Amino acid sequence: MVDAIRAKKSLGQNFLRDPHYLRKIADAAGIGPGDQVLEIGPGFGHLTRVLAERAGAVLALEIDERLLPHLQREFGASPNVEIVHADALDYPYESLPGKWKVVANLPYYISTPIIQKLILHRDRFQSLTIMLQKEVAERIAAPPGGKEYGFLSVLVQLYALSRVLFNVPPGAFTPRPKVDSSVMTLLMRDRPAVSVEDENFFMVVVKAAFSQRRKTLRNSLKQLGAGKEKMESVPGTTGVDLGRRAETLSLEEFGRLAAFLHP
Ligand code: SAM
């Protein structure tokens, strides 16, 4: 029955069955009986099973209705597991009671928007322990100065402490993904890494700066419409030379830039 369901590439279905890695992910998330766990994309429920054995409660969101009868059979008798047929991009996370740990082998085709959505609802989450395409994990954790560092790095690092933990080889999945995978944790910070008065505007500045990453800040920030005079006083006031490129700026420097350019 289960094997009759063919993995859908379009839903990022690469199932992880290897018990060694399933345990390693749950270990990394530090799940205990006091935890509420949100799993995105339970698939056939292999990771869900390990989480359910450790957590107080598991809520799993699965978009593929073909998998639901199997998941209901598997977890129907588990009082601490709730399976919900939902799109993780549309789920009303604000309705979740208390704090949650997210643990997921994410569907790679939408891992970035899912992370952005979870960050938006960060007050609900203690940590995210997620499997991602290796390159995306590296981009998230990248320090300033390299080509991996970008909008996603700044967004996540502003709100979370990020760490790439270990790699998982393609052979651990069925079907094998064409890319390498890494597990990373994002520990939500109590407050943003740099003090930012208007977080939305901060992200507007970061987005503009990276929108043309080969160009200097002088060019890429033009779209903010700050005016020539104000732009000319940026270096003196913020210490940020407009001849630099976005990828060289620390979070603190973006913070100073945003504070000064705030309309
Ligand atoms: N957790 C399972 C495992 O480790 O074997 C499955 C992981 S598989 C990489 C991704 C899962 O996410 C699939 O079950 C897929 O159907 C589900 N999925 C894809 N898009 C989704 C979405 N927008 N919302 C919720 N689940 C989604």
Image: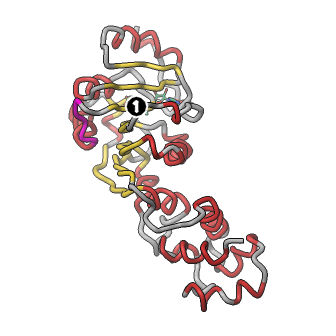
Q: Nearer the viewer, residue 74 or 225?
A: 225
Q: Mark 1 vs ligand 1: CB under 8 Å?
A: yes
Q: Mark 1 — residue?
A: 39
Q: Nearer the viewer, residue 179 or 29?
A: 29
Which residue type carries mark 1? Glu
The stretch in magenta equals: 29-33
Membership of 149 in magenta stretch = no
Determine the residue positioned at 39% across, 47% down.
Answer: 180
Horizontal arrangement in the rendering, residue 158 relative to residue 51 (left or right): right
Q: Position of residue 173 (x, y in %)?
A: 35, 33
Crowdedness near tag 1: few (<14), some (14–19) or many (≥20) residues, C-alpha within 10 Å = many
Horizontal arrangement in the rendering, residue 38 relative to residue 21 (left or right): right
Q: Establish if 251 lies above or below 228.
A: above
Horizontal arrangement in the rendering, residue 30 relative to residue 122 (left or right): left
Q: Position of residue 9 (x, y in %)?
A: 53, 31
Determine the residue positioned at 39% across, 55% down.
Answer: 190
Determine the residue positioned at 35% across, 38% down.
Answer: 101
